[in-house]
Image (cartoon, rainbow, N blue to C red):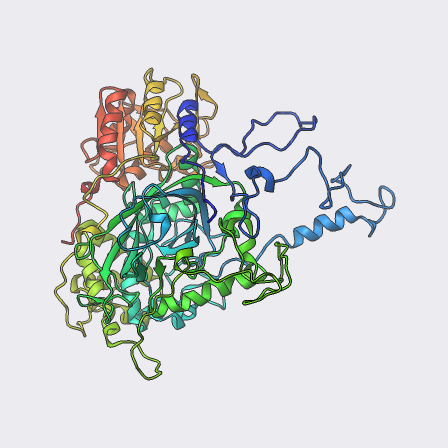
Amino acid sequence: MASSKPRRVRKDVADAAAKKDTVPGSPGSGAPTLAEPTTPRSPLPPKGEQGTPAPMTPTGASTGLPPTANGQQGDYLTASNGARLRDTDHSLKAGRRGPTLLQDHHLREKITHFDHERIPERVVHARGTGAHGTFTGYGTADGVTRAGFLAKGKETPVFVRFSTVLGSRGSADTVRDTRGFATKFYTDEGTFDLVGNNIPVFFIQDAIKFPDIIHAAKPHPDREIPQAQSAHDTFWDFVSLHTEAQHHTIWNMSDRGIPRSYRTMEGFGVHTFRLVNAAGDTTLVKFHWKPKLGVHSLDWEEAQMLAGLDPDFHRRDLYDAIESGAFPEYELGLQLFPDMPDETFGDIDLLDPTKFVPEELAPVQLVGRLVLDRTPTNFFAETEQVAFHLGNLVPGIDVTNDPLLQGRLFSYGDTQLTRLAGPNFAQIPINRPHVPVNDMLRDGFHQQAVHGGVAPYHPNSLDGGNPFEAGDDEQAFLDVPVTVAEAPKIRANPVSFDDHFSQVRLFWRSMSPVEKEHIVRAYTFELAKCYEQTIKERQLQCLANVDPELCEQVATGLGLPVPKPTKELTEETPSPVLSQIGREWPSDGRTIGIVVDTDAPDAGLGDVRAAVFAAGMVPLLIAAHGGTVGDLPVQRTFATARSVEFDAIILTGAPAPAPDAIPARDAKAGAKANGKANGKANGKAKGKAIDPRVLLLVEESWRHAKAVVAWGAGAAVLEATGMVGSPGVLVADSGEAALAELQRLLPAHRVWERFPATIS
């Protein structure tokens, strides 16, 4: 088989990012000149962190060409036929004021191509982003699967696409929604697609309902609103009637529905698959992705603010992290179960996609590491055209009879036919296998291979018998010969699928008090957005069958009666691993806002900024105006900064109101600090006025349970807000000490103890 040799993890990018000591986000690989460039030159190379699909032919052979071979070539502007052009700014006309001529082939080509640049967006998962990387096997799965990419030390190139489910391609990143986590492994045995989500269960048990749940969750068909939201009548009408959806729904109402970053998000294969080892023995499996940085989420107010302030927040976070060398990293894990005839584990039906197996019962065994170290060079060519398919399997991994999985095996290939204009989507560069392809598939729209021979059928003698069928010795894929029990043809689920509430209750009982508060807030917000009272009441009945306190709290917020349970409330043992709170994680790639007084910058500012970089985080200086403070660049001004951009705040000064702190110009300048609500917050420190936008920045950060640390003159800001003494609000005696306090607080993600919960 051909060898798949990816680029090694980009240590060069990380080292370069550390050395240049600059903030990520530069738009190009070269510095622009003030004057228009007029000296011809070849196209600039990609940025250091960018990657492209491997240069393979449509049939899986390496071209040996550099990755830029698929990009534009030459110094001069040309038409699509390669002819050089003299002018692209003026149409060909009959005189300067005359009509445009039909013979203007350049105008026709340019406009025609532009008119057809867009392709249909995905029906679901339209909003997404992606990155290239490398997967390295640990060798710990050898006993359960023959899949070669899991062998010890084996490196396999991958492309990962993260996405939201409901919104259109132009919707916001931070909406409350399930996130897609789809990984394309370009293995030596063919392409393997692990198409998962950040939630381990799904809304429905049978694929035949998939159009229905999506129709219910998408915008109402009459008004095409609301966009990328579940807070509307049709969604809650569906999930309250199809109660199998209640489990996925509570995950979505939890903080899992609003992740802080794709870098702090788990991934799950959702379904149960079947592994086959070298001896032919089988094991059932569920796939897990575990992020190195832990699982963290946004605050709901943050998510709403970001949807307007920076709708590309998750995209930008992913790209900036890679550019700065803080490569997103995940470990692939397996939950393994004996392959028994009933395909159950304890009382859990492994074929029910609305159920998961708690890790306390079946620990996740880590089998490999994924590092994302290159961003796309061209979003459309890579992220938009990548096509995932659950039928892309490799020897050693097979499917089960999960009825949702069975439908997805059809749907994922079928949906590409319209979106990517024909059956040859696997020949698009980002989708090309990294192994020889000899599939007997011919012709069709956008056929890019030039097939030889005259006999694309098997067996044949005219082409010398090629292609030949492979056996076990040639690493052929095996459809496991599972015995199917004798049964009548019927439209029905197994009886074991009927339990719709016990695992919903298990999830609720596994949450910490503050997470329960957030779940109550989410249900209350979403149901309050519904118009019909009957839908609210029906969903409250579902919540009564989950937990009385949850139901009571939501009913109180809606001003509705609390219904009695209609199902027996089972005693479920909590699964502590489901909670995001209570552990500490690395703070790599976190963004630290540093407030600077340009009139009196602290002498230790440069050292603190350098130390933040050295700690693997990104410092952004926030000042009254752009430009520099000394020789340090300012990335945000009081007019452009907002707390939701930052994971924590360092105050180095107490800036006076800037010239543009005018409410008529900037509404934030009219803000009043609430602080700790102790009656001392007056926006002044020792009689000195402070720019109200700085006070708002600090107050919002405090409200979202973020760490706020000050030293020197910055302590005056905390005094003015009345926050001194609040948990996670600290005054240090030096910049070094301030950063040390911040590094002590950040691993917990937020200062949860600042706001005690009322739910136990």
Q: Is residue 657 visible?
A: yes
For residue 197, side relative to residue 348 (left or right)? right
Q: Residue 380: in sight, yes or no?
A: no
Residue in the image at 21% along x and 69% along y:
561
Q: Residue furthest top?
A: 603
Q: Residue furthest right?
A: 95
Is 431 placed left or right of 116 in the picture? left
Q: Nearer the viewer, residue 321 or 441?
A: 441
Residue found 30% across the figure and 73% down from its top: 483
The residue depicted at 57 percent of the width and 66 percent of the height is 460
From the top left corner, tell me how far across and down residue 109 is, in percent: 73, 50
Using the image as rendered, state which of residue 437 and residue 659 is in the foreground.
437
Horizontally, is 478 left or right of 64 in the view? left
Looking at the picture, tell me which residue is in the foreground, 643 or 608.
Answer: 608
Coordinates of residue 425 in the picture (x, y in percent)? 55, 57
**Does residue 24 sit above or below 254 in this rendering?**
above
Q: Position of residue 51 (x, y in %)?
A: 49, 39
- Give the mark count: 0
In the figure, 187 relative to 292: above or below?
Answer: below
Q: Nearer the viewer, residue 265 or 469?
A: 469
Determine whether 312 is above or below 124 in the image. above
Q: Position of residue 507 (x, y in %)?
A: 21, 59
- For residue 537, what is the image quadrant? bottom left
